[in-house]
Amino acid sequence: MRNYKALLASFIEIVTFLFASFGGFLGKIAPPQQTQAPYAVGMMSFLTLIILLIISAISRSVAIKKYRRNWIIAGTLAFLTALPPTFLYHEALVEHTWTLPGENSLRVRGDYTEGVKDFLRLHPEEGTPEKLIQDFDINEIWTEDSLRHAESKLVRLYAWLVLSLSTAIFCLLEANVVEPKGHKPEANLRKSLATASQ
């Protein structure tokens, strides 16, 4: 019987290493807690694991002559797919998040309610979240629909970014691995990731 436990543990180790690499960058740029960030990050880990399993499974059956070329093509396409969310997600974080004075964690913001809009017509200089919380309850500043839209947008862009980046990394790592008979993709990937993060 195959040792699925050991195999799964090996792949999980790779995914965990990826999310912890570069100072835990992927975790640090996750959407704010209001967007159920732990759920989003957890699901990205599972989906990344599935992508890695698919890539590893394909690498075991692909023809040797086409092995490197195909992974280079797939990795390049995934990289190109990762470019839009690289910029869009950053713009979304700037547009839809803010920080409460005295806190380090981000909070989501959306479109102002009518009451806030009326207030800003008389006091345009108060048009920042940090100033508005001095005159309004935090739940009265933005509309619920706009907050939900902002939360959904951040999660979608984060998912797009993480999945496309992880796919590009795994494909290009496979392309850089020499394929002897009986090679173990998961071992080579783990070794290559360790080298790349140094």
Image (spheres, helix red, strand yellow):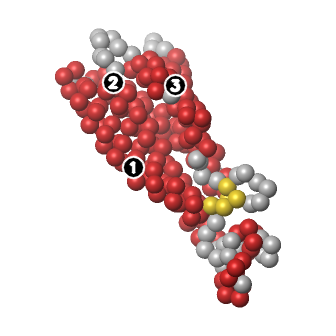
- Counting residues from the start of the chain, the first of labels 1 and 2 encountered is 1
- Which one is in front in this view, the residue at disc 1 or the one at disc 3? 3
Residue sitting at x 71%, y 88%: 122
Residue drawn at x 57%, y 64% as measured from the top left: 95
Residue 73 as seen in the image, left or right of residue 20: left
Q: Residue most toward the left?
A: 65
C-alpha gap between disc 1 and disc 2: 22 Å
User: For numbered disc 2, what is the local secondary structure?
Assistant: loop
Q: Is residue 131 visible?
A: yes
Nearest to the eye among marks 3 and 2: give it: 3
Q: Quadrant of residue 142?
A: bottom right
Q: Secondary structure at mark 3?
A: loop
Disc 2 marks a residue whose amino acid type is: Asn
Residue position marked by numbered label 2 in the rendering: 176
Determine whether label 1 and label 2 are within 8 Å by CB.
no
Mark 1: few/some/many CA within 10 Å (<14, 14-19, 20+): few
Q: Residue at x 70, y 59 (%)?
A: 99
Mark identifier at residue 198: 3
Numbered badge on residue 154: none
Q: Which mark is residue 83?
A: 1
Looking at the picture, how far across and down is residue 143, in whole percent? Answer: 64, 74
The reply to whether the C-beta atoms of the residues labelled 1 and 3 are less than 8 Å apart is no
Residue 134 left/right relative to 180: right
Q: CA distance from mark 3 to mark 2?
A: 17 Å
Amino acid beneath label 3: Gln
Identify the residue at horizontal 68%, vertical 76% (top origin).
127
Local crowd at mark 3 within 10 Å, few (<14), some, or many (≥20)?
few
* Residue 141 x %, y %: 70, 74
* Percent coordinates x, y for residue 41 in the rendering: 58, 43
